[in-house]
Image: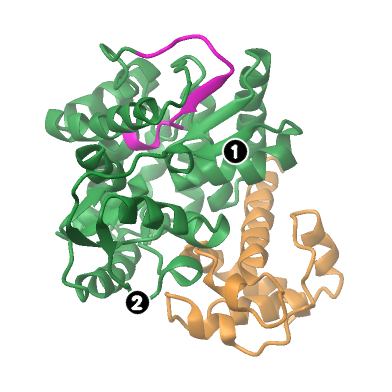
Chain colours: A orange, B green
Amino acid sequence: MAVTPEFFEQLERFGVAKTFECFNCGTCAAICPLVYEHFPRKLIRYAQLGALDRILENPKELWRCLHCGLCTQTCPREANPGELILGLRRFVVDRWRRSQHV
Amino acid sequence: MFNPRDIIELIAHNVKKSRNPFGVPRMILNRWWWRTPLEKKGDSILFTGLMYQSLPIIAKTTDQLAAFEDSPRARYIRLARYMPGALAGLGAALLTGRKERRQSDQILKNIATLLQKSGVRFAYRPDLDHYSGILLYDLGDQETFVEHARYVAGQLKHAGIRRLITVDPHTTYALRELYPKVTGHRFEVRAYFELLNATGGNGQRKVALHDPCFYGRYLELSDIPNRLLNGFNIECVPVKNSANFTHCCGGPAESISPKLSHAVVMRRFKELQATGAPIVAMCPICLGNLKKVGADVEDLSMILARCA
């Protein structure tokens, strides 16, 4: 798995200010109405590691999020997991659009 | 699940062409105000954001999407953006029933009447009443959302508008929280029920009030409708997961995955159903999604209009 340690800097451009606040406790995954494969905890971990391949190999997963805000409401670190997922969506949309112009 | 890219590009295309997510011409979509006596001048306006008007179209289009989700035909959704806007609008008009359109329009008429009865001075300017762009924001298309928000806010500023009275949680959140950040323009944004002061009547019943995520959690406004209903002698029975901890209706997923949306709304429906009371919604998305699964649900404005 290739990692891009400075990925958090790219995410800042998409409104994500707290990539590293999350300590992966899993409260977000427990409260999420999707109850789906450690969502959103797993994707947040990938973002922290800069595991772009893992995020981009199945980007559709990001759009499962309902943006309901329960994870953000309950996060003990105030890491704003919902906003991180939204930032990842913005990142992917931007990447799709830029790839169209190559 | 559809390819989000196809859905996002379709919605972005429609918003750029017609300023609403369905590509429907405004004169077809926004007709509730016809033959309704409303003030046309003023710096305080009713701003519907076209969400309730879109409810019959949302119901029809998500039914269509559900029919071929995860099928080989799903990939043809990307071709929809090549359909001319006027044709799409005509199609939408033919697909939606008159009864459904009348019900949605009635909600907006009720809200206007409730505001008038509460002595709130406001005008309605159909030329300024635009979709907020919130779906673009939710789907992560920040670029198109910002472009659209700047257009809408610019029109409002140019017209000298100071206060916006909103009718749904998505538009309220967009205008109150997001527009100042992305457009630099700030308006006084009030949800319509924040301005109502009517009490009395004889409700004498119990209801299960479903808090939408944006009112319950993001804007923390759910105590106000609760208080309003109590003022009419209507008891809001306790609902599992309310206010800050309200449960999503699944609506935000309906454009990408009707199946996922259905699974989520069924869970919420069971929580509301367990109260044994009729359900009251205050968001067009929640209302439509709960209706789809057969819930006994009506909009907050309908019950308030009967009591006021």
Question: For the point 47% across and 37% down, which residue is it?
Answer: B195
Amino acid type shown at disc 2: Lys
- Measuring from the top left, give residue B191's x and y in whole percent: 49, 41
Q: Is residue B105 magenta?
A: no
| Residue kind at label 1, given as amino acid type | Leu
Residue B43 covered by magenta stretch:
yes
Is residue A64 left or right of B92 when viewed as pictured? right
| Quadrant of the image containing the N terminus of chain A | bottom right
Tell me the quarter of the image containing the C terminus of chain A: top right
- List the residue tagged with mark 2: B240
Q: Which callout, 1 or 2, points to the residue nearer the camera?
A: 2
Residue B204 visible in the current orientation: yes
Residue B67, disc: none
Q: Chain of mark 2?
A: B
Q: Position of residue B57 (x, y in %)?
A: 28, 37
The answer to which quarter of the image holds residue B277 is: bottom left
- N-terminal label among 1 and 2: 1
- Which is more toward the observer, B256 or B41? B41
Residue B149 % position (x, y): 62, 32
Callout count: 2
Chain for mark 1? B
The region drawn magenta spans B38-53
| Residue at x-position 34% and y-position 28% | B117
In the image: residue B148, left or right of residue A7: left
Residue A74, picture quadrant? bottom right
Q: Give the labeled residue for mark 1.
A: B175
- Placement of B285 over or under A37, stated as above or below: above
Residue B14 in the image, given as x and y percentages of width and height: 46, 31
Q: Pointer 1 and pointer 2: residues touching (CB < 8 Å)?
A: no
